[in-house]
Image: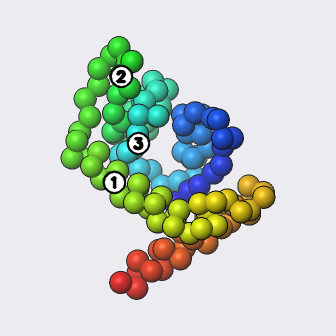
Amino acid sequence: MRSDITPGQTSDYMGFDLVMGDNLPKPAVLLTDRGYDFSKVRSTMEVRNVVPVIPMRKSRKLRVAVERALYRLRNRVERCFNKLKNARRVATRYNKTAESFLAFIDITSIRLWLRHLST
């Protein structure tokens, strides 16, 4: 898992380059929401031979089909964010600096991963 922070009013696709660095393992599928329905994101993933599963924005002129069976897996990601927000410190962002906030997200993620391994 990789996490990064963008300014509060930044659109989703502006943080795409930060998260999709070259040092990550090559994904087979990119599951995102409509916030990432941007031509640059789709072309970048197609160049990397990654299947983009992104629902279209309503304003998109060129219609693109979405494989619904794969898109349903995105629910797992949403549940992960929900579990991260169950940690009160993450949900209310008590930390003043971005570094300490990201560190606490990492600690909470490790705690969730260890809990998952023990069950």
For the C terminus, the image quarter is: bottom left
Mark 3 closeness class: few <14, some 14–19, many ≥20 residues within 10 Å: some
Q: Amino acid at mark 1?
A: Asn
Which residue shows up at 59% across the image and 60% down it?
Answer: 91
> Above or below — where is 81 with respect to 41?
below
Mark 2 closeness class: few <14, some 14–19, many ≥20 residues within 10 Å: few
Note whether residue 45 is visible.
yes
> Above or below — where is 76 with respect to 113?
above
Q: Which residue is mark 2?
A: 58
Which of pointers 3 and 2 indicates the residue nearer the eye? 2
Residue 101: percent from the left, percent from the top?
Answer: 69, 61
Note whether residue 47 is visible.
no
Q: Which residue is mark 1?
A: 75
Callout 1: SS: helix
Q: From mark 3 to mark 2, how far is it between C-alphas? A: 16 Å
Q: What label sits on residue 32 in the rendered view?
A: 3
**Is label 1 in contact with label 2 (beta carbons under 8 Å)?**
no
1 or 3: tag closer to the N-terminus: 3
Residue farthest along the right direction in this orientation: 96
Q: What label sits on residue 111 in the rendered view?
A: none
Q: From mark 1 to mark 2, how far is it between C-alphas? A: 21 Å
Q: From mark 1 to mark 3, how far is it between C-alphas? A: 10 Å
Res 115 quadrant in image? bottom left
1 or 2: tag closer to the N-terminus: 2
Q: Amino acid at mark 2?
A: Lys
Q: Amino acid at mark 3?
A: Thr
Task: Looking at the picture, tell me which residue is in the foreground, 29 or 117.
Answer: 117
Callout 2: SS: loop
